[in-house]
Amino acid sequence: MFKTAMPPQDQLIGQLVPIVTQACEILREEYQRYCAGADFDVERKEDNSPVTQADYRANAYITAALSQISNLPLLSEEGDQTQRKDWKAFWLLDPLDGTKEFLHKRPEFTINLSKVVNAETVFAILAVPGEYTMYICPEQGIPLKLDIASGQWFEYCPQDTAAVHVGLSQSAQSKPQYDEYLQSLANLTEYTVFKAGSAYKFCMMLEDRVDIYPRFHPTCEWDTSAGQCLIERIGGGLIDFKGRPFVYNQRDSLLNGGFIAYKNKHMKKLALQALELML
């Protein structure tokens, strides 16, 4: 959960908040246009995943805006990825994470922006345009939240809860691994399920609505970097099935393997016990 706080004096946050705020406005405009039934371009990528005019418009704006404040290269889902092997420090961007949610008229999509240095994420922003909310992990210190509409700032405040909340993607119900995992978890504890698309589930970890987030179907590096940074800063983490934290831009492929994200050490132990029972 969060408590009210004074606005941060961090220079990088001051530069990036207006950029991400405007990108949120762009996505809200596009979402309203789409929901109203206006003409709307939707294409299919090589992997058959959808990409829309909203993805492209937000990407173009953020790309141009970042170039005005930073010399770091940008690795974006909708940009050039051919030169990344030489980069030690760079921005990592998904300008619209949750395109499928967008197209199903569910406002759970996010903007994922992070700064990666030597394979580690050191700064992150997860914005939820539909909720006028931005979650920020500064280079030092605890996560912050901004209510974009009111301008009110908040800082993360840990809270212990006895209940266990499992975050799942909307598409998880069609994949048998998730049923198997939940059956294993049920042998250890009672739990409730929170379903949502995109990196929104990482935001809900900060809001005490998700404690464990298992993932068995593919994501890409721009889907996890910002969320991992935020939850690591509160004592949680994101690890592969061998217990290793994700690192970035270290492989030929930008596809991630499966992972377990958890809110704290207790949830990590519980999540890995369920995984071991499942396997």
Image (cartoon, rainbow, N blue to C red):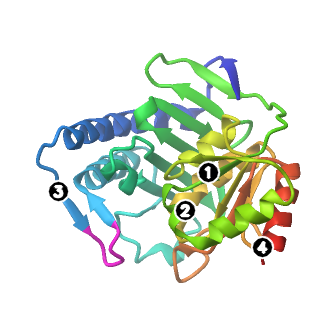
Q: Quadrant of residue 260?
A: bottom right
Of mark 4 and mark 1, the one earlier in the sequence is 1
Q: Position of residue 181 (x, y in %)?
A: 72, 66
> At 42% across and 38% down in the image, what residue appears?
20
* Residue for badge 4: 278
Three-letter amino acid code of the residue under disc 4: Met
Left or right: where 127 falls relative to 232: left
Q: Quadrant of residue 205?
A: top right
Position of 157 relative to 193 (above/below):
above
Q: CA distance from mark 1 to mark 2?
A: 19 Å
Three-letter amino acid code of the residue under disc 1: Gly
Q: Position of residue 158 (x, y in %)?
A: 80, 32
Foreground mark, 3 or 1, reads 3
Q: Main secondary structure of the magenta part?
A: loop
Q: Which residues are magenta?
A: 44-49
* Residue for badge 3: 41
* Residue for badge 1: 227
Q: CA distance from mark 3 to mark 1?
A: 29 Å
Foreground mark, 3 or 2, reads 2
Q: CA distance from mark 3 to mark 2?
A: 27 Å
Q: Position of residue 149 (x, y in %)?
A: 43, 20
Of mark 3 and mark 2, the one earlier in the sequence is 3
